[in-house]
Amino acid sequence: MAGRLEGKVAVVTGAGSGIGEAIAERFCREGARVVAADISGRQNETARRIGASCRAVHADVSRSADVQAMLETARSAFGRFDILCNNAGIDGAMAKTGEYSEENFDQVWSINGRSIFLGMRYAIPMMLATGSGSIVNTTSIASIVAFPTMIAYCAAKGAALQMTRVAAAEYAAQGIRVNAILPGPVATGITRHMPAEYIEGGQARDPATAHGGAVRAGERGLVPGQRRGVLHHGRGHDRGRRIYASLMRSPLRQRCARG
Ligand SMILES: NC(=O)c1ccc[n+]([C@@H]2O[C@H](COP(=O)([O-])OP(=O)(O)OC[C@H]3O[C@@H](n4cnc5c(N)ncnc54)[C@H](O)[C@@H]3O)[C@@H](O)[C@H]2O)c1
C-alpha cells in the first residue's frame, strides 16, 4: 500500500537528532523523499541510515544563503519540493530576564525565531510556483506557557507561532498550508538540560512516537481559513491537550500566574 506521503519531497531542518531525525525517518517510511538539514554533521548519519530517499545537507538555519541552498537541494536532488519542516532549534542559556545576556538572546532568536521567517520567506515563492505546499513549524508549548529563565526561548517560540498564523492567513487561499506543532516534553538533547519541573506536565517521550504529544495550532482554531490536518491526515491530539491542561494546573504555572 502506498505511504501517506508517496511522491512528496520534504525538507526537514534539525534532522541530525531528536524530533527532526524522527520526522525524516517517518516521512521516508511514508513514501516521501527527504532533504535532511542540520548544522551538526549528524544529518549525514540520518541520511546514511535511511538510504537513497534521504539526502543530507549542511545548513545553518539562521543564515539566509544556507536556507536558500537547502531548499534548492530538494529540487536539484529530487526534482520537486512540497513540504518544509522548520524544526531546528536550541534551548539556549537559562537565566532570569534581568541577567540574560544580549548575545544569548540574539543567538536563540536567530535560530528559533528568525529561521522560521527565513524558511517560509524562501519556501513560499517556490510553493506558489507549483500551486501547493505545506509548511510545518515546530514551535513549543513555550509558545503559550511562560517558563521562567527562558525569556529568549519563550519569545522566539511565541513569535514562531504568530508567524505561522500570519503566513497561514496570507496563503491559505493559494493552496499553501502553514501549521505549527507545539510539542510537549520529548526526550531529546533539549530536555536533557531542562529543570525537572519544566517537564512535570507530561513525561518526556521518545521522539519516534511523540506525535500525539503536540498541540496543533490549527486545531485550536487559531488559524483562519486553514484546512484541518498538518500534512494530509489529521491526528487526535488528546495527549497534547492533556499536557497543556496539566501545565496550566501545575505549580509552575500557578507560580507564574502569581508573578
Ligand atoms: N524536546 C522537547 O521536549 C521539545 C519541546 C518543544 C519543542 N521542541 C522543539 O523541537 C525542535 C527540535 O528539537 P529536539 O527536541 O529534537 O532537540 P535536538 O537538540 O535533539 O535537535 C535539534 C537539532 O537542531 C539542530 N540545530 C541547532 N541549531 C541549528 C542551526 N543553526 N541550523 C541547523 N540546525 C541546527 C541541532 O544540531 C539538532 O540536531 C526544536 O525547535 C525545539 O525547540 C522540543
Image: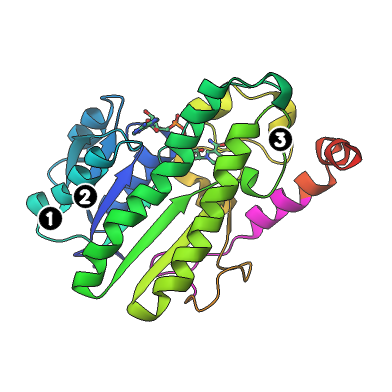
Three-letter amino acid code of the residue under disc 2: Leu
Three-letter amino acid code of the residue under disc 1: Arg
Q: Position of residue 27 (x, y in %)?
A: 31, 53
Q: Quadrant of residue 184?
A: top right
How crowded pointer 1 is (Cα within 10 Å; few <14, some 14-19, many 20+) is rated as: some
Asked if the residue under mark 1 is in contact with the one under mark 3, i.e. CB atoms within 8 Å, the reply is no
Asked if the residue under mark 2 is in contact with the one under mark 1, i.e. CB atoms within 8 Å, the reply is yes
Distance from Cα at disc 3 to Cα at disc 2: 33 Å
Q: Earlier in the sequence, mark 3 or mark 1?
A: 1
Q: Give the side of residue 9 with respect to residue 243, left or right.
A: left
Three-letter amino acid code of the residue under disc 3: Phe
Question: Does mark 2's beta carbon lie closer than 8 Å to ligand 1?
Answer: no
Mark seen at residue 71: 2
The segment highlighted magenta reads: 228-245
Residue at 69% of width from left, 40% of height from top? 202
Q: Quadrant of residue 231?
A: bottom left
Give above or below for 228 relative to 37: below
Q: Position of residue 70 (x, y in %)?
A: 21, 44
